[in-house]
Image (cartoon, grey):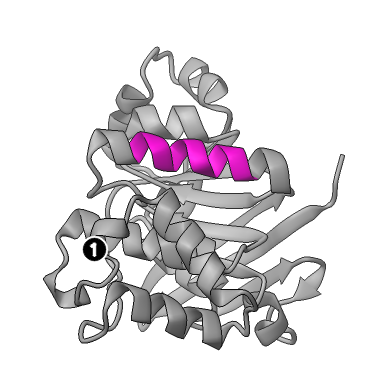
Amino acid sequence: MSEPIVQVRNLTKRFGSFTAVDGVSFEIRKGEILGLLGPNGAGKTTTIQMLLGLITPTDGDITMFGLPFDRHREEILGRVNFSSTYVSMPQALTVEENLWVVARLYGLDRIASRIDDVVKRFEMEEFRAKVTRKLSSGQMTRLSLAKAFLTEPQVLFLDEPTASLDPDIADKTRSLIKEIRRTAGLTVLYTSHNMREMEEMSDRIIFLQRGRIVAEGTAEVIKARYGETDLEEVFLKLARDPSPGASRP
């Protein structure tokens, strides 16, 4: 079995007296898609922000590619990327200009051909010259995904990547992620409130509740553990559990 690409040990983040992430530990191996589930406020976004170096952990360790994140931040971030429905790009630039900026920040070569490729993959030809502030929510999501795939990352953090997409583009996006995982060994941390999507995409799932991992395993293992045939019913059961310290499967 391959070594983990991402390792998180006892990750904790406190904001004053509030603990947003409380001693979380997990790992992701090369080519694995790990689903991160939990209700709003469970600590999912805070966890991803720490993995991207946007906020500093209060405690715990992050290692990627065998390198401690706190000592190799720039090198690691050059090999990862991120997409979220809730993060926008510079509004005054066109779609294509935004992609050029990202490409230059990452020091990419063959920029024009790379941009042509992601524009085609996400069916963005008709709005590639459009000013970003005029994009629909679905078009903005496609731009965020194109930005993430443009750099050909080894690790990809996806925060509800298909939330604003129509079913056709969402299905094509999932297929693209799985194809790049198959051909290039892409490693993914994936969040979504679409339970069908989480079952389709995730090799394993961890469930966060109030900053702690309360369930962990494949979708089938987790459903069996809680006596359900539907992952959404497990989600409801765990989200409504008043005692978040439940044992993991």
The stretch drawn in magenta includes residue 134: no
Q: For the stretch drawn in magenta, what is the main secondary structure?
A: helix
Where the C terminus falls, by quadrant?
top right
Residue annotated with mark 1:
127
Name the residue type under label 1. Answer: Phe
Q: Where is residue 180 in the image (x, y as percent from the top left)?
A: 62, 45
Q: 28 and 132: which one is in front? A: 132
Q: Where is residue 75 in the image (x, y as percent from the top left)?
A: 72, 82
Image check: 158 left or right of 218?
A: left
Q: Is residue 25 above or below residue 113?
A: above
Q: Which residue is drawn at 30% across and 42% down?
A: 242
Q: Residue at x 24, y 58 (%)?
A: 126
Residue range highlighted in magenta: 170-180
Viewer can see residue 30: yes
Give the quadrant of residue 105: bottom right
Q: Which residue is drawn at 31% across and 58% down?
A: 125
Q: 60 and 106: which one is in front? A: 106
Tell how many labels: 1
Q: 13 and 83: which one is in front? A: 83
Q: Residue at x 85, y 45 (%)?
A: 2
Image check: 216 left or right of 46?
A: right
Q: Position of residue 19 (x, y in %)?
A: 40, 70
Label 1 sits on a secondary structure element that is helix
